[in-house]
Amino acid sequence: MDLTLKVWRQKNAKEKGHFETYQVKGISPDSSFLEMMDILNEQLIKENIDPVAINKGCKNSGPVSFDHDCREGICGACSLYINGRAHGPDNDVTTCQLHMRKFKDGDTITIEPWRSAAFPVIKDLVVDRGAFDKILQAGGFISVNTGGVPDANAIPIPKKNADLSMDAAACVGCGACVATCKNGSAMLFVSARVSSLALLPQGKVEAARRAKNMVAKMDELGFGACTNTRACEMECPKNISVTNIARLNREFLCAKLKD
Amino acid sequence: MAEKLISHIPEGPLAEKWTKHKAQIRVVSPVNKRKMEIIVIGTGLGGASAAASLGELGYNVKVFCISDSPRRAHSIAAQGGINAAKNYQNDNDSTYRLFYDTIKGGDYRSREANVYRLAEVSNNIIDQCVAQGVPFARDYGGLLDNRSFGGAQVSRTFYARGQTGQQLLLGAYAALNRQIAKGTVKSYPRHEMLDLVLINGEAKGIIARNIVTGEIERFGAHAVVIASGGYGNVYFLSTNAMNSNGSAAWQCYKKGACFANPCFAQIHPTCIPVHGTQQSKLTLMSESLRNDGRIWVPKKKEDVEKLRKKQIKPSQIPEEDRDYYLERRYPAFGNLVPRDVASRAAKERCDAGYGVNETGLAVFLDFKTAIERLGEKVITERYGNLFQMYEKITDTNPYKEPMMIYPAIHYTMGGLWVDYNLQTTIPGLYAIGEANFSDHGGNRLGASALMQGLADGYFILPYTIGDYLSHKFSEPKTDTNAPEFEEAEKAVKEKISKLLSIKGKKTVDTLHKELGNIMWEYVGMARNEAGLKTAIEKIRELKKEFWSNVYVAGTNEQFNQELEKALRLADFFEIGELMAIDALDRKESCGGHFREEMQTEDGETKRDDEHYMYVAAWEYQGEGQEPKLHKEPLKYENIKIAVRNYKD
């Protein structure tokens, strides 16, 4: 496959970014999107090594930076906005699981970073998602220390609740929901964690307090409000449901009533 | 020479060693804990659980990871489950049985006392994780469910769908977040350790590079814990994450810590086969699939030919023409033999010409029988995300046609040598999880990596490190202006400048792929003397080429992924060389280390207990010098040494 790529280039957080256009050739339809990006980077580096290319004035701004790690859809590092969609045109996948067979030979592909006030660009397609860690630090845990806990089977948990908790816990923290939301809201992310814990007896104890603290932190960090467009659910690579937002709202209201 | 490796295994009966040891080691008072600092490198299951637990105890912890968040550590990708000897299934499991299976699975090359302790604390891990809100799979009665894994005849594996590693890591990460919020732990994401700093022979800090700004920073502490995982990416193609690397452990080796059993690398039997030269990594299909999936190749060569030409579909091959070779060769364990055995059996069939894809390097993993028995819904519940992943990657529906799989590098059993306290040969330097060597011998059993990471981090290190620190509480905070820090920082900066100034003709990835090819060819699933000697020579040549002809784009003072890769690759050459040296030294076959010269008539591994029942711990002797071998003899007082038998 031969493709034209329009890639967002930005030197660092302070400088203004711009698009650059590149051609890549001979991409296998079985390659993943990130393998295609690897090939682009090898090409960009080689152009800067090759004296013929340099003489022709081909010098480019070097390889494109992008976050990636596990390349099997679980670490949540990859975060590309492809042709106007978080993680690109396939459904239920992260960028690393998107394969080139989803594109056509000769396509032009536009590649951007997540765009959200709460996720500033570090370089090119790499953004700072530290705000997610800060939200979780505000309450995304159960307050138990290591040791001194009861036997794992001491409290039976209905299979249905355990399954729903697992559905919500599947969130990989990639930030596609924030990047997709027109308000830049992190409600789906926050609600996934709040729900996953609130559905279990162990997490129920501090559920209201947790919801309140995490929402307050989310607001403080510059994420927008939720206006129920459900775009986040559409683009979530792990199918996290907006019913989790309803559950979060319930816990949040409980907390407010107790105040 | 013998003094180098003092294992500090406590005296007394096996089952009492840990209890007795805990009673004897010293503790640090809460007031003194507040004065002490500990550095933890890595935030996978080992690092996150250790940092959180140490923070809870009151120590001041600094935790470092190379990703943008601790949650991205590669433990997240573990799929199938975590072992524990709970015996919830009433199938006669016990601490002893888990211990025995682990020693046997490791082909009698791990330490009895460490493994017994691992089995002993395994139950606490499950309790801890449930208390943290890990949504393990449950039965309709609300109690925890189990499944079976390779190398065991009981069901002792706890799981959260096909995302067990993710859920356990989110538990440990949550505990870590709680401590970060409390201020006992300070987190340094996007920081990479580039050197270990010793003062008077003791570990006192690190030099790290801020990955965003390129700044080289110094951090001091009273002790340093390495939890940076394994070095499987030396092969370029592996199931490890792209950024997984061996560099933190390797810096410790170069500062004097012994590196043990480097040649023990695990090749996982069920990975998605290589699709072509553009491939960047390999994807694992969980071992749990072998609970219900059956592995086979055609019996007839003509069927193989037709499959390769895509003239027939695998589902069209009738039952009687299928060779379920694991069930045939190992009737007692069938598809659930340990990983090394299953990998070699796949290679044997492919080498014999029965490989089923275009490259001839694949076998089938078939769910037909299980779907007939249990229905598609149950299979989806158990493995839904894995089936989806398989379909996304290969464009084939595994509910209709069998998966194609082939072995790939997955885990490294070797690592920094540690004593019973998980301390390396450098005082104050500890290694936990995959970064150490201690529990898995020549082959790790499935679902035991998660168990070891959390055992070390939650329940072992927080105790044993106290014994060391109890002698140190009167020492002031480490002065990072000390000449040792200055020197280490200077060396790191020089190394980076050197890399950036070469401006050669080959890219970092090109050289890494070349190294990977050498490793896979000569230090892969089958090894022999001539091949290993060739490997050592070729790796040395390639390392020379790297240092004279690599092109590293960009500068240090920026976010620079090429520089990160180059720094890691520089160490991979040396790690690969030591793996080959170790493999050459070990003239026996055991676990994942298969020396072609040493095999039984039917192609099984042949150990040489008389000459090689030892841990090979290598000590760095300086650039260009042969490393020095120290041997820690392995003593089995509670287990009868036998030939590993999974046949009957």
Image: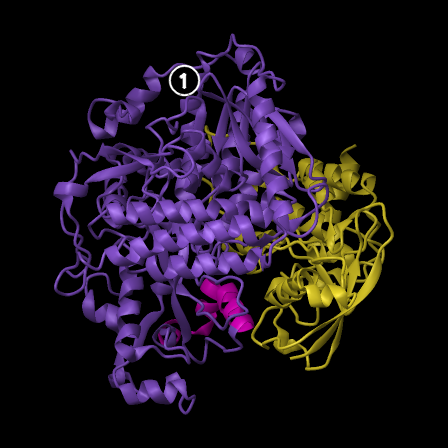
The image position of residue B593, as x and y in percent, is 28, 53
> Which chain is drawn using yellow?
A
Q: Nearer the viewer, residue B205 or B629?
A: B629
Does the magenta portion include B396?
Answer: no
Indicate the quadrant where residue B556 lies. Answer: top right
> Which stretch appears magenta?
B371-393
Label 1 chain ID: B
> Which chain is drawn using purple?
B
The residue under label 1 is which amino acid type? Answer: Asp
Q: Which residue is mark 1?
A: B467
Q: Is residue B198 above or below residue A68?
A: above
Indicate the quadrant where residue A237 lies. Answer: bottom right
Q: Relative to A209, is B613 on the left or the right?
A: left
Does residue A7 appear in this view?
yes
- Secondary structure beneath disc 1? helix
Residue that appears at 41% across and 25% down: B426
The image position of residue B154, as x and y in percent, is 27, 52
Q: Relative to B228, is B501 on the left or the right?
A: right
Residue that appears at 37% across and 37% down: B625
Does residue A153 appear in this view?
no
Our reading of the magenta stretch's main secondary structure is helix
The image position of residue B501, as x and y in percent, is 64, 46
Give the colour scheme of this rendering: by chain
Q: Nearer the viewer, residue B72 or B412?
A: B412
Identify the residue at the far top of this view: B474
Residue that appears at 38% across and 34% down: B620
